[in-house]
Each structure stands twice: as C-alpha cells, then as structure tokens.
Amino acid sequence: MATYKEIRGTQIEAVATDPSNPVEGQVWYNTTSNVLKGQAATSAGTWATVNSVNTAKDQTSGAGTTAGALNFSGGPPGQAVTELYNGTNWTEVNDLNSARRATGGSGASSTAALCFGGITPPNAAADLTENWNGTNWTAVNTMNTARNFAKGTGTNTAALVFGGSTGSGGNPPITANTEQWNGTNWTEVNDLNTARNNNAGAGTTSSGINIGGYVSDRVANVELWNGTNWTETTDINSARLGMGASGATNTVVVGYGGSENSSSATGKTEVWNGSSWTEQGDLSTGRQYIGSTKGSYTSALAMSGSTGGPLGSSQTAVEEWTGAGAGQTRTFTDS
C-alpha cells in the first residue's frame, strides 16, 4: 500500500493549531487536540457542531467570522455577557455596558462590532448603541427610533438597522423604519415595504437583505436594499421568525433556524443565489433567536438561541456552516 508521502510528496505535519488555509487532500496531526485531520471538499452546504459558548442565551446577536467571532447580549432576562471565539474556543471578555436582549448586531470581525437597540430590563425598548473595539464596549450615539427584535447589516462604521418593535417587550407597534450608521450618527433612510419584527438580515449598507419575520403571523417576505431603496423579491420557502442569516452581500446568503409555529423551532437552512432560495443541510438542533456571524455565506456560525415552544430553553450550542463547494476540515476516527 502506498504511503501518504508517496502519494502527496510530503510527510504528515504535526502542528499545534490547524492550518489557516488548508488545501484539498492535505492531512495533518493536531498535537493540541491529539487528532488526525484532513481537508475534504463538499458539494453541498453542511453544518458541523463546534465548541459551545459558556453562557446559555437566546435573543442574542453576533459579529465576525468563523476564525474570529463575537457573541453578545441575550436573555433571559437581559444579559451583558460577551464571548470571543478564536476558531476553537469561547472566552468571556468585557461585558456590554447595558444588559439587554433582542438586540441587533453588525461587524465583519471580532475586533470591531456594533450592538444596537434591544430590550433593557424589565421590558423597555432601547435606542442604545455600543461600539466594540476588540477590548471594550463604548456607548456611542443612540438610534432615532428605540426598538427591539430588529436586525442589521454592515460593520461598526457603516451599518443598517431595519424593522423591529417599538413597544415594550417586543410588543406592537411594529415598524418599517430603516436607519443608517456612518460611524458617528444614525440617519433615517427609506423604509422597508413591509413593517415587521423578528426578521433576519445580512449584507452591507449598499447591498443588504431582510428575510422573514413577523407581522400578524410569520412571513416569508424578502426585501433587497441597494443603498437607497428596499425592493421586494423572491420569498423564502418556509415562513418563519427568529432566523439567523450570513452573507457578505445580498446576492449570496444563507438563512437558518427560526420558528415556523409557536410550538417548536426549526433547523431548516435555505441558500439564496440572488434569484431563488434552495433548502440545504439543516442545523443539528432546531433553534430560534440565533446569533449570526456576518462576514461570509461560505463559512458562518449559528450561536446559541432557543429550542422554542412552551418548554423551549436557551442554548449554548454553536454550529459551523460550510457552504456548497467549499473545503471542509474532517477529523479521522478509529471507526
């Protein structure tokens, strides 16, 4: 039988951390976790379980990428807890200044993020904005409209917030209001076509997407933002609220989780290619009110959330998405 060196022309490397950009067919031994790993290709998007956050929460937000992520805020009743992911483990870092849940979040890295809105204990809609610089959260200028269960896109210097509830505790009225952040101030811009809360968002301030949510019931509506206006486009296949979404623009996006009814959460995952939605591999654990990384469709994290229903509970679970056609790291076992 041919050896790995004879096939690949090199020995199996022993490394303390996994390679940052492994190529298909590469094999290595991780001396920290004491496992043999290899890089394979995948033809369809899939989820894989990774290390959990330390604190269970739902109605949470996230920022960053799979190599460096941030998970912050959440409930119940309202948390200031912030955790940092280094690609392997979660570490608690400095808290938000204001404990809250049902916030919006933006940020393409774990060193620069924005947290806005939400519900501050006991049940008030918040206009608060905090900026993360990699070490601390700093209170900055507030939104024009206090709201909760809204979502956002972009970075900590160029962000959008859209939709949400202006009432206490997620209650009506529901708003279509959209605001844009320039790194200093929020400015009202053109509204969504359909007011909603519990929606999902991805993209940038010039190429954003708003997915699903709740009006008088769960909706499948999707709208695209071109930097000036929102335009209705093809609906997702499954109407739901409390989804997560990831994507660097509004042309390639993955939406996941949420709830289709009041009794349970779903793991359904749908991929947007700029014109239609296709269901692919589901989350291992159905969850709603998920925290999402923002940077990429091909590589994303679904963080925490709730299993939903009357007996639903806050979760610590984290899963990593590998998009169709992208490489996937696999661990070899004895079986």
Image (cartoon, helix red, strand yellow):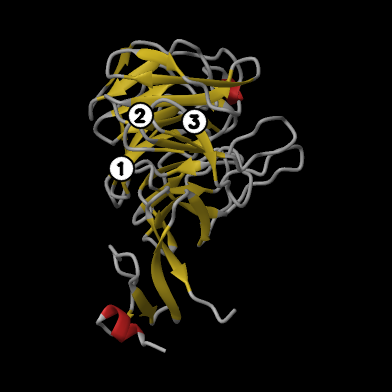
Q: Residues within 10 Å of mark 3 (few under 14, many from 20)?
A: some
Q: Mark 1 is on which residue type? A: Ala
In which quarter of the view is residue 288 placed? top right
Separation of marks 1 and 2 at Cα, in angstroms = 15 Å
Q: Of 223 and 71, which appears nearest the observer?
A: 223
Which element carries disc 1, helix, strand or loop? Answer: strand
In which quarter of the view is residue 124 placed? top right
The residue that label 2 is drawn on is: 250
| Of the two numbered discs 2 and 3 in the rendering, the one whose residue sits closer to the viewer | 3
Give the x, y percent position of residue 149: 52, 27
Question: Residue 307, relative to residue 320: is it above or below?
Answer: above
Q: Of 92 and 9, which appears nearest the observer?
A: 9
Say whether residue 114 is visible.
no
Which element carries disc 3, helix, strand or loop? Answer: strand
Give the x, y percent position of residue 285: 63, 50
Quadrant, the N terminus:
bottom left
Q: Mark 2 is on which residue type? A: Asn
Q: Of 32 and 253, which appears nearest the observer?
A: 253
The residue that label 3 is drawn on is: 277
The residue that label 1 is drawn on is: 108
| Of the two numbered discs 1 and 2 in the rendering, the one whose residue sits closer to the viewer | 2
Q: Residues within 10 Å of mark 1 (few under 14, many from 20)?
A: many
Residue 173: mark? none
Which label's residue is closer to the chain start, 1 or 2? 1
Q: Residues within 10 Å of mark 2 (few under 14, many from 20)?
A: many
Separation of marks 2 and 3 at Cα, in angstroms = 12 Å
Question: Residue at (71%, 43%) from the top-left corner?
Answer: 312
| Of the two numbered discs 1 and 3 in the rendering, the one whose residue sits closer to the viewer | 3
